[in-house]
Amino acid sequence: MSNIGKKPVKITEGIIVSQEADKVIVSGPKGTLETKIPSGIQVTIKDGEIVFKKETENHELEKFLGLSRALIANMVHGVALEFEKKLELSGVGYRARVEGEELVLNVGYVNPMKIKAPRGVKFSVDENVITVSGIDKQLVGDVANKIRQVRPPEPYKGKGIKYVGEYIRRKAGKAAKAVGAATK
């Protein structure tokens, strides 16, 4: 059985959790999120905790038990504190700026790339670091990945957009390969 699914989710102060048929709605100071619970998973809200159980002893439900618990735990965290992903620009002349609801990226293409922020996501730029923040963890991750895909980091010089703290495995160029072949 899923060990994650066994752990209850603690409801912190200021968070309101309600249940309607097969949906769980979480409201907090940052906003409101809702998710659909798969059939066969029972959600109980009591004593400041959310508890998850399988309705039957079907082994196929185990994966959904842990998934449901993780999704609702992320919702509770998101409406209380927000999630954020940071991306770093590296390259000569690579710049980013925020214009209203859009992120404008100058990353070596002829025209600047514009990415519109979906509802619930905010952009901020500080020097060469782009911060994507919002209450929905999945949406924040998807938008950050979309930004990274505009110019992924390349392995020779390391230019591009990468996550802060991401390690880019570097390759040797043609000149280094030629020197290595001449010494053999």
Image: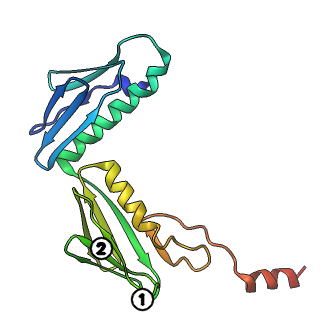
Mark carried by residue 93: 1
Residue at 35% of width from left, 64% of height from top?
86
Instruction: Tell me if I can see residue 87 in this picture.
Output: yes
Instruction: Tell me if I can see residue 163 in this picture.
Output: no
Q: Residues within 10 Å of mark 2 (few under 14, many from 20)?
A: many
Q: Residues within 10 Å of mark 1 (few under 14, many from 20)?
A: few
Residue at 18% of width from left, 45% of height from top?
79
Indicate which disc, 1 or 2, sits on the residue closer to the N terminus: 1
- Is there CB contact under 8 Å for labels 1 and 2? no
Query: Which amino acid is tagged 1?
Result: Gly
Horizontal side of residue 100 vs 70, given as left or right: left
Q: Image quadrant for the C terminus?
A: bottom right
Is residue 167 depicted above or below 56 in this figure?
Answer: below
Can you tell which quarter of the image residue 127 is in?
Answer: bottom left
Residue at 47% of width from left, 85% of height from top?
108
In space, the residues marked 1 and 2 are separated at their CA atoms by 16 Å
Q: Secondary structure at mark 1?
A: loop
Residue at 58% of width from left, 80% of height from top?
157
Horizontal side of residue 54 vs 48, given as left or right: right
- Near-viewer residue (147 or 86): 147
Query: Which amino acid is tagged 2?
Result: Leu
Q: Secondary structure at mark 2?
A: strand
Indicate the position of residue 141 as horizontal and vertical percent values: 37, 55
For the image shown, how many numbered marks are present on the structure?
2
Mark 1 or 2, closer to the camera: 2
Is residue 30 depicted above or below 50 in this figure?
Answer: below
Indicate the position of residue 48 as horizontal and vertical percent values: 15, 26
Mark carried by residue 151: none
Indicate the position of residue 165 as horizontal and vertical percent values: 44, 64
Can you tell which quarter of the image residue 23 is in?
Answer: top left
Q: Would you name the residue on which mark 2 appears?
A: 103
Horizontal side of residue 62 vs 127, given as left or right: right
